[in-house]
Structure formats: C-alpha cells, structure tokens
Amino acid sequence: MPNSLPNKKIIVLVGPTGVGKSEVALHLAQKFNGEIVNADSRQLYKEINIGTAKPSETALLEVPHHLYGFLGPHSSWDAAKFVEEADKVIASVHGRNRLPIIVGGTGLYVRALLYGLLSGPKANAEIRKRLKDVIKNEGLLALYKELEKVDPVSAATIHPHDPVRIIRALEVYELTGKPQSQIQEEHGFQKSRYDFLMLGFLCEREKLVRHLNKRVNAMIEAGLEAEVRNLVSHYGWCDLLKTTIGYQEWEPYFEGKISLNQTVEQIKINTRQYAKRQMTWFRKEKKVKWMEAGKLREMEEMMKGFLNL
C-alpha cells in the first residue's frame, strides 16, 4: 500500500446475511492495510453477540474493527447517528493512511453513508399517535399489511416487526401522498459523499439457505438460548430484543406457547426472509459490482484498479 490513499477512497462490502462478508472483509483488510467499519444495525449493540454473528474475538484482534458492540440494549440509534459516527471513524482511518472497509447488511445505513439522508417531511405527532394506537389495538402486522397496500416496494425491504420504519413509511405516505419508495426513486441518490468501490456478494439460493440453516444450528449450540435468557433477565423484552432476528422468536417459547424446535425453525424462516429483503434493497443500488464471495483474486484485482495500485 502507498503511504497515502488517493482522494480518500473507501471500500464497501454488501450482500445478504450469511454470504461471508465478514470473512472477505478480514482478508481484504489484511491484504490492503485496511480497517473494518461496521454498517450492520444490530452488530452496533453489545451483549447481543451470538444471534447477530459478530466477528470472532480472533478476527477483532487481527485487524482494527470499528462500531461493533458499543451501544447498550436500550440505546436508540438511527441512520443519521450512524453516518455521524461512521464519518468520524473513516476520517480517523484515513488519518492513519489506512483503507476504510465498510461492511454491512443494513442497506439504509450504507445508502445514507454514501449519498446522505433523504430529507423527508418532519415527524407528525398526531399521525404517529394514531399509528401507534393501531399497533396497540390491532397489532403490528395490521400496520404492516397497510404498508404493503400503499407502498409494497418499501414493505419488501422492511421487517414486519420493525415498528419504527413501518410507522415512518406510512407517515411519509400520509404527509406527501406519495409512497416513500417513490420519493427515494425521485431523489436518485446520484451525488456520492465518498469515492467508493462497492462490491456485492452473491450466493446461489439453495446454497445460501443451507448455510443459513447451518449457521442458526451453530448459534443454538453456542448457547443462544442462554444468552437471550440472560438479556431478558437484565433488560426485559426491550424493543431491541423484540425486533432482532434470533432473539424475538424466543418470547413465545419462554412463555410455553411453542416448542424449542418451533423456535429454531422460526429463526431460520425469519433469517431467510431477511436475506431476501436485503437482496431486494441492494439490487437497487446501481453501482454495486456483483460477484461470488469466494472470488478473492477477482476482488483484489478490482481493488488494485480502484486504488491505482
């Protein structure tokens, strides 16, 4: 690596959960004098470790990792806060003449970092109260089904158990008369904040499903149930646990409503659905260069060209 990076460039690695982003990031960071910056909204939190598949302790020691496991379970976080912190980290990495490698599956965070946040209408307390009342009286699923009717494109990228984003999408629709997805499309996200190379990782569907199922089984063997029980004993069923795959599924099991096997199967189903939503989001990113996660030589050559090495 040269002593300085031309034009303060960054590398961005995206793709569905379980495709191998963390492993590739570690390899590339070692090869190109890089430091890894997390862009996964759940890996920001400490104490939720097994179910979020954070990098291993060994990996964390091999190269510098940033924005992993620093928030408490009750901490609130959003894309604006992420961009603010990520900008600081990227500047510090550049200041050490090293290469920032952004890794994440949270499409909103990645897009906000690269193109800035979409300035939508301000929050409306009356609308939000009414929507929250719907959740209280009819359940979150009723609100999600409403979103599917008025903005199916946004609904395809939002988890049915994510009240914050569901409410915001419906709020935007009510205030503007336009689906949030249409407003985003009109924005275009053309002017980038960084000079970046974005690599997207593909995996044949059946192979990915097998890997995801295997990974969930490994999480169970690693003590996921005990981790969830410990978190609930300290924090109760807080919003983070109720909206995080690998954790939310345990509530009915702890209440004796479903079996352990049903719980594990539900985690697998939700994980597969999440991977599908991630791909739906990232396929809309026009500048992604797609490839199989195992093609390290091809990635290295693309990075050398991008970095003028």
Image (spheres, rainbow, N blue to C red):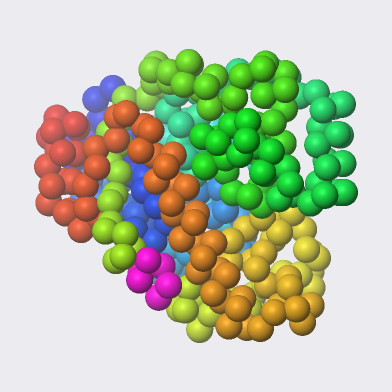
Q: Nearer the viewer, residue 111 or 64?
A: 111
**Magenta-colored span:** 209-214
Q: Quadrant of residue 198?
A: top left
The structure residue drawn at horizontal position 32% and vertical position 52%, both measured from the top left corner, is: 25
Q: Position of residue 284 (x, y in %)?
A: 38, 33
Q: Quadrant of the N terminus?
A: top left
Q: Is any part of residue 101 visible from this angle?
A: no
The structure residue drawn at horizontal position 50% and vertical position 54%, both measured from the top left corner, is: 274
Q: Nearer the viewer, residue 117 or 9?
A: 117
Determine the residue located farthest toward the front in the rendered image: 149
Q: Position of residue 70 (x, y in %)?
A: 61, 53
* Residue 256 shown left or right of residue 93 in the figure: right
The structure residue drawn at horizontal position 13% and vertical position 47%, both measured from the top left corner, is: 298
Count of numbered badges drawn on the protein: 0
Q: Position of residue 299 (x, y in %)?
A: 18, 46
Q: Quadrant of the C terminus?
A: top left
Residue 220 drawn in magenta: no
Q: Position of residue 16 (x, y in %)?
A: 40, 52
Q: Is residue 7 above or below residue 15?
A: above
